[in-house]
Structures are given as structure tokens and as C-alpha cells.
Amino acid sequence: MKRQYAYYLLFILSIFLAACNRSSEIPDNSLKLWYKQPAAVWEEALPVGNGRLGAMVFGDPVNERLQINEESIWAGSKINNNNPNALKSLPLLQKALFESRYKDAFGIADKNLLGTPPRIRSYQPLGDLLINYKWAGKPENYQRELNLETGIATTSFTADGKTYSQEVFVSAPDNIIVVHIKPLDKGFINASFTMSREIDALVRAVDRTTIILNGQIIDKYDPLSGPGGEHMKFCGELRLTATGGHVEAANETIIVSGAEEVLIRLTAATDYNFDKLDFDRLVAPSAICKSILDKTDYKSISELRKSHLDEYQPVFSRVSLTFGNDSLSAKPTDERLDAVKNGGTDNGLIALYFQYGRYLLMGSSGNPALLPANLQGIWNKDMNAAWNSDFHTNINLQMNYWPAEVCNLTETTEALTSFMEKLVVPGTITAKEMYGTDGWTFHHLTDPFGRTGVADGVWGITPLNGPWMTFPLYEHFLYTRDTVYLRNRAYPLMKGSAEFVLGFLVESPEGYLVTNPSHSPENNFKDTKTGEISALTYAATIDIEIINALFDYCIEASSILGIDRDFALQLDDAKKRLPPIKINSKGVIQEWINDYDEPEPGHRHMSHLLGLYPLAQFTPETPDLFGAAEATIERRLSFGGGQTGWSKAWMISFFARLQNGEKAYENVMDLLRKCTLPNLFDTHPPFQIDGNFGGTAGIAEMLIQSHNGVIHLLPALPSAWGTGEVKGLCARGGFVLDMKWSNCNLEKVKVYSEKGGRGKVIYKENEQEINLAAGKTVNLKF
Ligand code: FUC
């Protein structure tokens, strides 16, 4: 009997050990995008970036390609494109719009307000780094991955019986792209290395260690986008160190034979002068590259990797998110995505998508970025990119920064703040020249040269896009409680913006203070009385929501800072004279000043719902507007709304604010199913990064909300996320929270406050007050 018992125990023990063994064999890929084949097209390549430099790694073990970007390589030049006729035609245009004479209004606006010239030029790639590996046989046992925990893209394979690894990362502290190729056993590397660019550049291997790509964008004159000429200068420099073997240089190529290891350091620069928002012939891109690379000449790969990880990891690892076991991470990412597209569920993929959004924001807007994340973050392969890969300010640039604060990446907003500070200069000229006001503004897009006049067409007449873009700055204050930032940086911009609005508002026939001209981004309405279709109107609902928020923020800030009391009173008075937000005959939030028809009721923009998210003007405390906001979304969706990536991503946050976890989750799944490429980039065919950022922000919004003075825990938790844990999400008021839940019930909550402060925390119907001293943590029980 005893022996039987011992055998039984032994049996159990062996099963246990076998299980342990198996689980240690399954690699943890929960923070990896990984694939069994190289990228066949750009949309399958893996992005790496440090905010200033970016690369798309194809991971081809024979013909490797790294498509490279530097944030300031832009075609075009600095132009004041404010239409000189704007100011004198403004009264005529306003009159036409007040009198619903839309054809007249269009004619006046098209001729006199449209930018001169109306179009900008494109953000462009630096070029490619091309590596041609020579193996006797075909590489096998192939795998490539992007590890979000390290920010390193690794390709590994066996060739001629040896295992090789190629690592790529973009170091923020060293400001370079690093490529390290190494056999893991005693293999040798035979390969040639070169750089290339389709146009406007010359490449040469200067010696056995250095390849230089030198160029200058030559723009042709185009009446729509402005003067031609020799514009932005740029340079890319590559330095190669081979250990052992033989190295020679020929024309634009370096050829390495029989090396034990190859290390490439690559950087790029332009003659862009951020302070002037212009290229500057006093800046020498090649000298910048040289000085950056000189500093790393004596650094080994381990030192380079260490300094990269020391800077990258503490920021990335601030937030973790899991929904129980990520059992599917043993499958390649493209197969996981395909399974989801075929109707499967995969919470682990959602957590990966969430973290990928954080990774992409660090990679496109982290230090040392000068410019904010553009429509493609920093990653663009085209000389004429879709929408020029520009800074679109009628939803897209705003959406790029939605995850920044809540997802604990507050430093990524620095590039945005400083860009906005620069835009104030041309924006002040636009306010004065076009609208005759104080303050500053810009319209629906801009470029690094600071275009602030009207772009593209009359739908570009959105003078309140400047004010809208001040919100991320105030949000930065709300999350950090950094009053020095508020006083010196955010508030001056907000005040200038409010001054513009005050000067721009005019009295409408109904006696309201209104914006005129005005436009609900990219949507048209049909005037029920005249049957005419128009984009332009006065007092589109989005404008009222923007002004209410801007004035509230300014009033609050002036009281926190103890300044500008009279100005705050003036704003308060003006606020009282704005039109109310209306619910129309269909029971939805009315998008325009009157209850017009909608030629496109499923339009992708949902600008009049800014009040639901990201603003918090429609909440359960305003039940009518809250209900109408919900009806607005249902109506939009029933007509095919939310069809593009960013629009779908916005839906997630809308439903999160409506505290409808199931619908929010459905939209997360739709985002993955309908709007996501194999490398998890968001589509707006081809690719647009705002949907990635909007998706990440939306997932965070399902887990935590912190508007109107209350921190709301798990406000939109879907049943599919029954078990989970999140650490490091931020709440307004300067709090950082960890939460753990199972069976859809919150089990643990930890709140930390860096600066100290009070707050109210709600979970379901329960409410608790917190009052934390600086640096203190509290565990809450609900
Ligand atoms: C807005 C959207 C378009 C596109 C463009 C870059 O204008 O309406 O769909 O995303 O930005």
C-alpha cells in the first residue's frame, strides 16, 4: 500500500515536472510581434524609431531592406499662404452664410480665403539601407520579431549550417540606428551594404567604413503647392565596423567578406531649423551626422544596446496589461490577426495592440523628436505620401496624442508642445491677416514650415482647429499638475487662442455669439429650405464645444495661476452668449446650427461628439445630451460610419464613455478585423497611425476614466475581459493606478500620487475619497 502511494506520488510529480518543463519551453511572446517569414511588402515590415529617426525592417535574410526616415525631411518651403483678400471679403462671406446663400459663400471663400497656395508638399523618406547577404544555401529556420520590451527588431535564421541574428534598434540617447549582425555559433558574414534613394540624392562609400547619402529636395513649381527650387538639404551617414574578415569599398557599396560580426551605426540630419520653421543654409546636415556618429565611434554593441535599453525600458515598462494567460502568443502575429479576422477572439492580441500603440508613440514622438508624430508617426516610404503624411489638425494630430497621458508617456507631448509654441508665430499672422484679430490660429493641416492659412479647399476653412489643438497641452497639466508648465507654456498658448476666438466671434441673426465661417470637419449638410448642399455655415456644433472647453480651461487655469481675472470674466460672459448644443428632430446631437439634412449620415467624422470624447460635456449628469450622443453614434453606425481606422478607433472611446463595455469591445475587435495590417499598423488605406493611437487610448478608456473630478475604475469592462491586470495607467490629478480583477470584479486597486492630492474614486456604485501625500500609495477596497 505504501509502495503504491509512493508510485502515485512519483507519478504526480513527473506530470508536474513535465508540465513545468513544457511551460518553460513555450516562449513568452506576449510583448512581441513575430513572424515566420520576411516582410514581402512595406506593410509587413516592422517599425523601430526614436522619435527623430525611424526604420522599417523587412527582415529579409538575403536582400535585407531597412527603409529609413528622419523626421524633418520634407518637401516644400516656408510660405505665408494667408490669402491677402481674406480680411476684406470676410464680412461678405459672413453675410452670405447668415443669409444661407451658400453658392455665394462658396464663391467668396474659394476665391478669397483659400490659401495662396492651397497645398503643402510631402514628408519624404531618407532612403533605404540595403544589405545583400551571400549564403551558399537558402537560409532556413527563419523567424523575425519586434520585442516591445526592448524595442529591438531581431531576425534569426540558419544559413550554411550556422545560426545568425540581425538586431536593429534606434537608440534615443545615441541618436542612431544600430544594426548588428552576428553568428550565434562560429559562422562568417559575407555581405554588401549600400544606401539608396529614388531621387535627389547621391550615395558614395567614402572609405571602407563609411557610406554617405547626400541630398537636397528639388521641388518643381506647382501652382497648387508653391514655388519650386532647391529646398531641404539632408544627409545620411553609415559607419560600418566589421570584426575579422576583409572589407572593401567600391562606388556606393561596402563589401564585407568572412567577418565574424558586423556593426552598423547610421544617422541622418537635415538643414531644418526648428526655431525658424524653415531650412537654414547655415546648418550643415553632414556635420551633424558626423558629430553624432563620432560620439559613438568607440562604443561596443553591448554599450550601445545598454544605453538604448537604459533609456527605453523604464519608460515602456511603466504600463503593463494582461487579460489572463496569453495562450495564443505561441502563434505568429499575422496568424493571430488572421484568426481574429476569421471570427476568433484573442485578448492577448488586444493587449499587444495596446502596448504597440504606446511603443509607436515613443518611436515617433519620444525624445529626441523635434516634431510631433505625423499622420504616419515617423514611418513613410513615399515621396508623395498619402495626405503628405502631414500634421492634420481636424482630428488626426489630436488623436495621435490621446494615449499620451493616460498611458504614462507624458514626455511624448514635449514635441507637440514645442511645435505648437513655434506655430504661434505664423498663427498670429494668420489671425491678424485673415480675420483681423489678436491671438493666433491655424486651419486643418500644417507642415514643419508652419503653414497656417487655409489648405486644400473650402472644407479647409476651420479656424477653430488652432484652439482645438491647445487641449492636449491643458491635458498635460491636468495629468501632471505641473503648474510651471501651465504658467510658462500651456496657458500663454491657451490665452492667445482664446483671444483669437474672442476677436473672431460675431453676433448671429439669432443674437448669439458665433463663429462664421465655420465648418464641421469634412462633412456637408443640405439646407432643408433651399435644398443646397454646403460645407460652410456658421456656428457648427464642434465650434461651440471647442469654445466652451477652451474658455473653461482658461478660466480654470487663470484661477489656479492667480492671474488674468478680468480676462476670465470676459470669457465667462462670452460663453453665456454662445448658442446651446441642440438635440435635433432625429433625437441626435445636432451637427450644425440648424436641423439640416445629412447627405452622408454615416460620415467618418463625428466632430459634434467631441463633447462625449475626448471632452466630457455629455455625461450621465447631462442625461439628455448623453442619450442623444448615444443615438448619434447608433445613427452614424447604422449608415456605415466608423469605416476607416481612426474613425473606428474613436468609436471605442465613445462607447467607453457611454459605459458600454460590450460595444466598446466590439469596436476593438472591428478595429483589428477591418482596419489592421499584418504589422498591426492601422489602415486608412494605405496606412495612418492615428487609428493605432486612438485604439490604444480607447482600450485605456475602457479601463479607467478620470474626467470631471472623478476617477472611474473599469467603467466599460466587457465580459470578454473577465480577468485581467493593468499597472501604471494615469488619471487626471496626477495619479497612477494599478488594478487587478477577475470574474469582471475588481479585486485590487493601488493608487499612487507623485505630487500629492485629493480625488474621488468610483467603482460601480461605490465611491471613495483619497487624499495622498506626495510620493504616497494607497490600496483601496471596494
Ligand atoms: C482627415 C480625414 C481623412 C484623412 C485625413 C488625413 O481629413 O477626413 O479621412 O484621415 O484627415
Image (cartoon, rainbow, N blue to C red):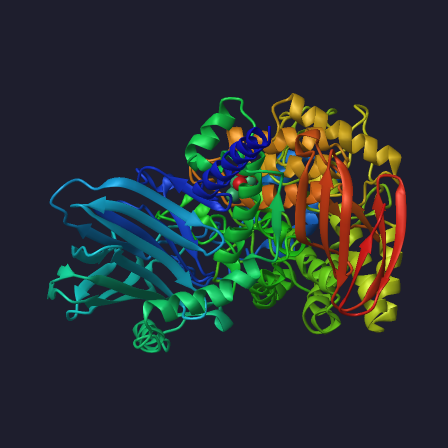
User: Toward the viewer: 464 or 349?
Assistant: 349
| Residue 458 percent coordinates (x, y) | 57, 42
From the top left corner, tell me how far across and down residue 671 is, in percent.
56, 33
Q: For this view, does 74 lie left or right of residue 697?
A: left
- Residue depicted at x 45% and y 36%: 330
Side (left or right) of 137 relative to 646: left
Q: Nearer the viewer, residue 528 or 400?
A: 400
Q: How many dots with numbers? A: 0
In the displayed structure image, the side of residue 294 where residue 588 appears, left or right: right
Q: From this viewpoint, is residue 371 visible?
A: no
Decide if residue 779 is on the left or right side of residue 61.
right
Q: Up-down: is 229 above or below 651?
A: below
Image position, residue 579 (x, y; %):
84, 43
Q: Where is residue 673? Give x, y as percent.
A: 52, 29
The one of 753 and 548 positioned closer to us in this rendering: 753
x 42%, y 67%: residue: 306
**466 or 40: which is nearer to us?**
40
Q: Quadrant of the N terminus?
A: top right
Q: Examine the image and state in which quarter residue 302 appears.
A: bottom left
Say if 509 sits above or below 260 in the image. above
Identify the image quadrant of the C terminus: top right
Examine the rendering and report whether any part of residue 662 can be seen: yes
Q: Determine whether 652 is above or below 526 in the image.
A: below
Q: Is residue 765 above or below residue 443?
A: above
Where ligand 1 lies, by image quadrant?
top right
